[in-house]
Amino acid sequence: MNIATVPVSSIGRRAAPPDGEGSVQFQPDPRATIDNAKVFAVYGKGGIGKSTTSSNLSVAFSKLGKRVLQIGCDPKHDSTFTLTKKLVPTVIDALEAVDFHAEELRIEDFVYEGYNGVMCVEAGGPPAGTGCGGYVVGQTVKLLKEHHLLEDTDVVIFDVLGDVVCGGFAAPLQHADRALIVTANDFDSIFAMNRIVAAIQAKSKNYAVRLGGVIANRSAATDQIDRFNGEVGLNLVAHFPDLDVIRRSRLKKSTLFEMEDSPELRAVQDEYLRLAASLWAGTEPLTCAPMRDRDIFDLLGFD
């Protein structure tokens, strides 16, 4: 059996109530919940640096003494690459190996320990054009709960595939307390952020998730981000400049906390530690109103 042939009844059904006007969303197993940890879902435009941000944020939480689990939700399955120093097998790989008989899996078949004790899972994804990303996320959370891993976890970070805000890849929002958006100080990144704001707004009607704020990445300035945030009601919670050491860390399969010390690196590490401490202490939920596409062009597109 492969994911393309898993019966629709086992993958999901129309949500009731729907998550928005005309919405058809993956409906998770209501028993597969994350009850004991603080859960963050990291979204943003493809290629914006969500995996780098997520992995370094995971390490920052671990440096604060928290037990951290990072879940990559991308068929590329490289979210935890700098934590584990390799591309680990995905949950879908593990399920295929046992012909989707999940009861035969052991925890070591899909959970790997990364740098500073961060536990790492790559959910993976269905083959292109088949299956449902929500099924993958749902099965991952279900397996983690069945193996009691979530009981010993303080922080869960979902690193989610860029640009896609369909029912499947919006599934982490059904588990998250706060959604964080990674963006650069440019029009395309902010346009994608606006769509993510709309998706989170839709999910917040029926789930506890709320927007936690914006992380500026690879950006010397934040003027465009600040202008958009002021219009929709978002806050900037961290700012990471476009430094070569960040690029090199990825090439070296390392988090920023493992790179050779320098003043600029310490500043970035301190910003991650500050962000982790702030998120752990709790951020006020943000109620935001996404802009119409034309209005974003009028605000940012014609300078």
Image: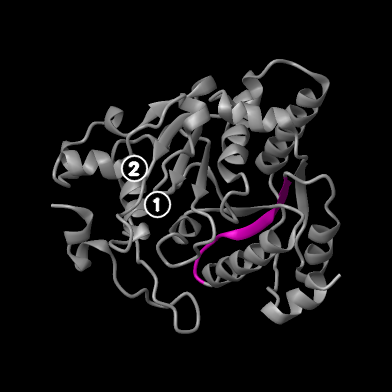
Pick the front one: 159 or 10: 159
Q: In the displayed structure, would residue 30 be above or below residue 119?
A: below
- Tell me the magenta residue range: 206-217
The amino acid pointed to by label 2 is: Lys
Q: CA distance from mark 2 to mark 1?
A: 8 Å
Crowding at dot 1, Cα within 10 Å, few <14 / some 14-19 / many 20+, comes out as some
Please give the residue where the numbered disc 1 appears in the rendered image. Answer: 33
Q: How is the image coloured?
A: one colour
Membership of 281 in magenta stretch: no
Can you give x and y, in whole percent of width and height, for residue 180 in the image? 63, 52
Counting residues from the N terminus, which is met first, the one under dot 2 or under dot 1?
A: 1
> Element type at marker 2?
helix
Residue 194 picture quarter: bottom right
Please give the residue where the numbered disc 2 appears in the rendered image. Answer: 145
What residue do we see at 71% from left, 34% from top?
Answer: 272
Q: For the image shown, how many numbered marks are present on the structure?
A: 2
Marks 2/1 in contact by CB < 8 Å: the verdict is: yes
Single out the residue that lies furthest toward the top: 260
Asked if residue 32 shows in the view, the reply is no
Residue 51 picture quarter: top right
Looking at the image, residue 32 sits to the left or right of residue 232; the answer is: left
Residue 230 picture quarter: bottom right
Can you give x and y, in whole percent of width and height, for residue 267 in the image? 80, 28
Can you give x and y, in whole percent of width and height, for residue 56 in the image? 62, 33
The amino acid pointed to by label 1 is: Thr
Asked if residue 149 shows in the view, the reply is yes
What residue do we see at 82% from left, 73% from top?
Answer: 302
Crowding at dot 2, Cα within 10 Å, few <14 / some 14-19 / many 20+, comes out as some
> Element type at marker 1?
loop
What residue do we see at 28% from left, 45% from top?
Answer: 92
Taken as a whole, is the magenta stretch helix, strand or loop? strand
